[in-house]
Amino acid sequence: MRAMLPSRADLGARISELLRKHRADLRTRTYGNADLNPPAGPYEVVPVTTTDGAHLRVHAYGPADAETIVLVHGWTCALEYWNPQINAFAGDYRVIAYDVRGHGESDEGTAPLTTDQLADDLDAVLEATLRPGRRAVLVGHSLGGMTIQGWAGRYPERVQQRAVAVLLSNTAASDLINHTTVVPFCNRGGLLKLPFAVGLLGLSLPVLFPPIAPVSWLFRRQIMSLDSVGDIAEFGQNIVRSCPAKVRGRFGELLSHLDVGRGAVNLTVPTSIIAGSDDDMTPVVHADLIAEMLTEAGTLDGYRILPTGHLGNLEAYREFNGELARVAKSAFGIPAQVVGA
């Protein structure tokens, strides 16, 4: 008797499950550099449901009663992107990391994708993870930094209630396409201006990053820096590859139109900035503009430019961890024994 062929729905479900496992494997691989590996200690899974009913994957590492650091990752990443920081700080702090909606294992949700929705998601995470009367150091990379600025613009009254300090890395407030230097010869020193339509197309395409040598080199050249090699380069590409192409395209469209306005002015706690000298995604000009707003608000606490591309807290994680240790010590008065700083 001839075996029945699987239905289209069954086949689609099997393919989806295989892709889910593959993406999870990309996020949880181990490397010769142990600082990049999944944290060895236990963690708490914190249930968080957003305003549109989406469930977010939220992990809490470190002592439950310790002062708190909240990590917000960027476009096409996941909470594992913060492994170099979780491994360094979870011994002394309670470190919260979560998957932005649609990324990692968080639901994509049904609400329109806006910076206001991402701000609401962050607010829900803070509500679920911070104990009454406690405040956290908020750390945002790229889209995560934009989310924090958007949150401050949307909920200015909660900044003092929830945050004790902020660290923004490789991020911007608006005009990504007008300033990006990812496309050769465009937006560099008055040369060709990148047309908005071309930038929109590039950011919103559901691009794949197969692990072949030319693509890996191009990823290092345009997203990281060519100085990033070995485990650092492989880890960065694996994390980005773990993001579904559809989600990459959808969030790329959001970034094309991104404008969190003057949200940084509402960051009324000490706020520091880290930029990358070779960052083509969010060039230093963006950090300069945010620094101007923070100076106006009287809350600029520090500004460093590291010799990295866009993945600064990975490419120069020891220097990044040193700056985060300074911010946390100043905020909490705790001289942490930071691993890898």
Image: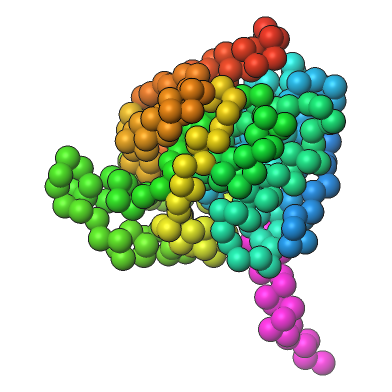
**Which of 48/339 is in front?**
48
**Which of 166/16 is in front?**
166
131 lies left or right of 112: right
Q: Residue sitting at 50 percent across and 35 percent down?
A: 265
Which image quarter is the N terminus in? Answer: bottom right
Magenta stretch: includes residue 19: yes
Q: Quadrant of residue 107?
A: bottom right
Q: Which residues are magenta?
A: 1-30
- Where residue 240 appears, x then y in whole percent? 52, 48
**Which of 314/300 is in front?**
300
- Where residue 44 appears, x then y in whole percent? 83, 36
Instruction: Please state the total of marks drawn on the protein image.
Output: 0
Q: Residue sitting at 37 percent across and 44 percent down?
A: 281
- Where residue 334 appears, x then y in whole percent? 70, 10
Relative to residue 161, is residue 147 depicted above or below?
Answer: below
Residue 208 visible in the displayed image: no
Please tell me whether the stretch drawn in magenta is mainly helix, strand or loop. Answer: helix
| Display coloring | rainbow
Q: Quadrant of residue 71?
A: top right
